[in-house]
Amino acid sequence: MTTTTTTTTAGLYDSEGQEKNYLNHSKGLWSWLTTLDHKRIGVMYMICVLSAFLLGGIFALLVRTEHLTGGETIMSAETYNRVFTLHGAVMVFLFIIPGIPAALGNFVMPIMLGTLDVVFPRLNLMSWYLWMTGGVFFVASLAFGGIDTGWTFYTPYSTTYSPYGPAIICALSGAFILGFSSILTGVNFLATMHMLRAKGMSWFQMPLFCWSLYATAIMQILATPVLAITLLLLIAERTLSIGIFDPSLGGDPVLFQHFFWFYSHPAVYIMILPAMGVVSDVIAVYSHKHIFGYKFIAFSSVAIALLGFLVWGHHLFVSGQSALLGTIFSLITFSIAIPTAIKVFNWLATMYKGSIDLKCAMLYAMSFIWVFSIGGLTGLHCAAIATDVHLHDTYFVVAHFHYVMVGGTVFGFLAGLHHWWPKIFGKMYDEFWGLVAWALVFIGFNLTFFPQFFMGAQGMPRRYWHYEPQFQAYHVASTIGAYMQGLGFVLLAGVLLYSLFAGKKAPRNPWGGTTLEWQTTSPPPLENFPHDEPPIVGDPYDFHAIEYKEELEGYVLVAAPAAHDAERSIVEEIVEGAEADSYGSRGN
Amino acid sequence: MTQAHATTHDAHGHDDHGHAHDPNQAHHFESMEQQVASGKLGMWVFLATEILMFGGLFCAYAVWRARHFEAFEIGHKQLNTLMGFINTLVLIASSFTMAWAVRTAQLNKNKATAVLLALTFLGGCGFMTIKYFEYKAKWDHGIFVGEPWGHWNTFREEAKTELEAEKTATQLAPPTTGTPGLVNALPTPGKTPEGFIGADAAAADAHGHEAEAHAPPAAHGEGHEPAAEGESAHAAAGEHHIDPDDALKARTFFSIYFCMTGLHGLHVLVGMGLIAWIFFRALKGEFTETYNAPVDLVGLYWHLVDLIWIFLFPLLYLIS
């Protein structure tokens, strides 16, 4: 053991005497493909999910371009059906669900816990390979002619009517495999948070991002298997015609909807909760102020996770569900607004009297609050049975869930990406161009989806290829917005990629973060923390413990963070509010 | 949980602890206990996902049984309860040897562990063999799920044509004479149409395999020619008539039967693979008092597979 230890230690430094980091401690593609390091797996995930985002985005632009005019603009109705289906399927299964947990979470979470790795590093790598396999199946379904069922694979489209049988089986297998990948990530994360928190770190000293990943893991573990069996049954139905969902064989198509949404509604929270976690951390850091209502935010994540299992029926208000059932589902759906609102108010209270730094990450986080609130509040329209009968399957619903998924998850993802980019790659990006990209994305996003609320309320049905002339102005505005977003995303990619080559070297803590990942180098060494500097555990939001150092262009830890839990009494919150101007210590 | 915290820096500092570590301990764990506890937690959580996956099937089962209770009545009689019962015993016995193997592994008795694991593996083999014969029998009788390979569809078509022909016959015949064929073709709910059940051993003998599955009307004979005969033949065959709807419904039962037992069988196979893996490790003497987690975890998995069967057996074989 001693000899291996010595060689490891010798290998810790590069030729310039700098400690090697996880990026340069070994070289070559093979060293990445066989890595068990959670940071490298996170980066590999990031590359892959962002590629999927690009693919899904191209499909989205095709859809929007088609809608510049009613009738055929650039594609036939059949092609249109396949394009919007793949847009949805790729975005949901390949990007949004794995996006934040598998890419950012994988990288950041173990460092936040002050540990070496996730509990099961091999499973972690396996989940990445499963993701890749699932992705290949999805792309292969294109080769078989594409799928045209919508991303939900509703029966009887998927069992009976769609002519693209092999493509559907391919896509279903892909989604099944991706589900497995998601389950493994969930199991891994949950066990990591239980078993591997740094010595002395209590549950309530975990950063809120970890709490949100914990809640996400619960849902990944409990909901995804049901999707797995549903997809298997659907595959069996399509290949062997067993007839679980086909009415002509004694099956029930609505049963599919129940099964599907039993997974897919919790999946909506699998998508949004990690984003909420990112936003909780980002808001505290850029307000330079202790998070307000730590336990409320932490437990509201868990509450959302649990309630999220009980609301799937609100997708079936017009599917022949009984009025009593509809009423119950409607009520539980309304109740989810409570933990969600608790989060929003806590974020606002955190910002109140904080010393706010309008950096890119903070702008995305603030846009998240704005956009997600619109998405959430319009969700209430859809949760009310009477209005939903009118709004169901219209562009109102499309706008609602894009405000939640894009405005919520994507903005949360981007906030996290900007926040942790210097930590992940050790380079600073250009703030100004980052801001320009943010402005394009934010304005473009609202321009794309806000008109869709009007269209939908006036009766424009979703997934239609053709529309009446009265809707054209809205559609054109929406398409212009989509192009604007596209431009913003390209610029954003340019800004971040440029920083890899020409960016300034990042200090350990450029933003003033107080969680453990900011105590280590940027990028971190293979074993997460420099071997002579173990992380110092304490209140993860103790901003008194850090100070800005001009010469480093970053913050340093000047005292051990307070040893108590992150939750504080209301009195402390108020006192700190009064003191707020005096720290943050940037003088702005 | 307090003992389970990890320090961050023992990866390159194993020597700091001043005592030798188990070579099986992964570098990111502080102690063997922590590693074992982590593995167990992970396995239990994984088993939860398995339960939910089967939970979907049990849910489909419940919905269908409530909706097509006659189909379950008709269908389950095709199953061989004795074989199912023997299989249950086999699996319980294998669970016992598995649990015993876990204990011997903890006591550092690798030889005993290997023997017990071999027995467990044989239990799995026995289960799959019996299952094979059950499936084979169903297959031979044309009971399968799908159109590509099963005979259900052709059977359904035949039955439909038959019914059509009878309707025509009824229209032709004067209403006052009565048409027993039609009456029997539309059985009241809950009434099991005779002939189809195939429980009638005589009919089964007379008509061979096909008869057991969906005993055709005696008057039709082996040829199974649909509706070519005259009215008199129908009148004779009347009480053995097969309702196409019931054929369809029994198929419903077998769809869920094959889905549930098929998925379970797949799990048995996976479990056997895992047992084979730890069997060879036990042969090599790899397990010790401190390092026996693989046996333990495979054991947990095997017990779950067993447990699922304990639920499947009454739900599929013992209903009435």
Image: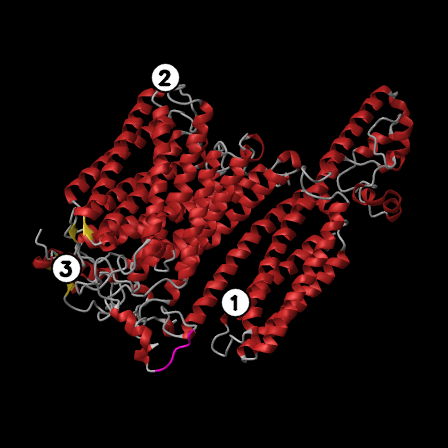
Q: Residues within 10 Å of mark 3 (few under 14, many from 20)?
A: many
Query: In the image, are marks 1 and 2 on the same chain?
Result: no
User: In this image, B74 relative to A460: left or right?
Assistant: right
As helix, strand or loop, the secondary structure at mark 2 comes to: helix
Q: Residue at x 39, y 53 (%)?
A: A216
Q: Residue at x 27, y 66 (%)?
A: A565
Query: In the image, are marks 3 and 1 on the same chain?
Result: no
Q: Is residue B271 visible?
A: yes
User: In this image, B165 relative to A247: left or right?
Assistant: right
Mark 2 sits on what residue?
A469
What range is drawn magenta here?
B19-23
Numbered-mark total? 3
> Which badge, 3 or 2, is on the more N-terminal residue?
2
Q: Which mark is residue A555?
A: 3
As helix, strand or loop, the secondary structure at mark 3 comes to: strand
As helix, strand or loop, the secondary structure at mark 1 comes to: helix
- From the viewer's side, name the closer residue of A8 and B107: A8
